[in-house]
Amino acid sequence: MSNFSADPEPPKRKSLFAGLRANFLTGLVVIAPIGLTIWLIWAVIGWVDGFVLPFVPNRFKPEQYIGINLRGVGVVFFLVFTVLIGWLAKGLIGRSLLRWGESLVARTPVVRSVYNGLKQIAETVFAQSDTSFDRAVLLEYPRKGLWAVAFISTDARGEIDESIPSTEQKVAVFLPTTPNPTSGFLLFARRSDLIELEMTVEDAAKLVISAGLVYPNAKDPTRPAEQPAQAAE
């Protein structure tokens, strides 16, 4: 009686099409973020040029001398003009002119409302003081058993703090929406109802934007992302 040994099946070789497809997808993952970033920067520079250059006299435009329309010239003029206005606004004369201009705007009903709203937004976004979120937290929302990522903005103050029927510390919490974190809900909660996370606000924002696909530490999501080592002093 002869013994039959089952030969192992040879490994299946990937077809040429499957290999090309895998290489194409890998290359797309590498190229897409770089390409989109370059395209976005290029588009923003072109938009700024198109808005600023019509206000610049022709004698100051480099294309009048070299015959080439250089992209980014409008951005340079915008930066120089903005720095100059900021320098003038800090001086005595600049502050006086600014107060005089705001007093004129305050007398115009519709313009006053638009200007005050835009000014508050600009001061909030571009202020040099510390106005960023404090910590990333977990909050039970919209019902118990469901948890959402949120950000502590500041402590509850004044009438809101006094109106909430609790003697515990209350905080203002911003609950962003996915995948657009610029919109969301302003909630006031007791600090004891929040679970503070070890991840940074930036890592938590990436988690929200990616709809849970990008964790701070992809290798081990149970641990916070490793922070870059600080340079030796």
Image: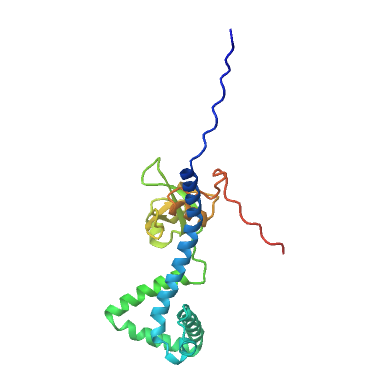
Foreground residue, 185 or 74?
Answer: 74
From the top left corner, tell me how far across and down residue 194 is, in percent.
47, 48
Toward the front, the furthest residue is: 2
Toward the bottom, the furthest residue is: 59
Foreground residue, 223 or 99?
Answer: 223
* Relative height, residue 65 to residue 139 (above, below): below
At horizontal 46% and vertical 78% (from top left) the residue drawn is 71
At horizontal 42% and vertical 75% (from top left) the residue drawn is 46
Foreground residue, 98 or 23?
Answer: 23
At horizontal 48% and vertical 72% (from top left) the residue drawn is 127
Viewport quadrant of the C terminus: bottom right
Q: How many marks?
A: 0
Q: In the image, is 6 to the left or to the right of 157?
A: right
The image's colour scheme reads: rainbow
From the top left corner, tell me how far across and down residue 218 is, in percent.
54, 47
Foreground residue, 141 or 217?
Answer: 217
From the top left corner, tell me how far across and down residue 216 is, in percent.
53, 50
Viewport quadrant of the N terminus: top right
From the top left corner, tell me how far across and down residue 114 is, in percent.
32, 75
Toward the top, the furthest residue is: 1
At horizontal 39% and vertical 47% (from top left) the residue drawn is 141
Q: Is residue 59 visible?
A: yes
* Relative height, residue 66 to residue 41 (above, below): below
Toward the right, the furthest residue is: 233
Q: In the image, is 231 to the left or to the right of 159?
A: right
Q: Is residue 194 visible?
A: no
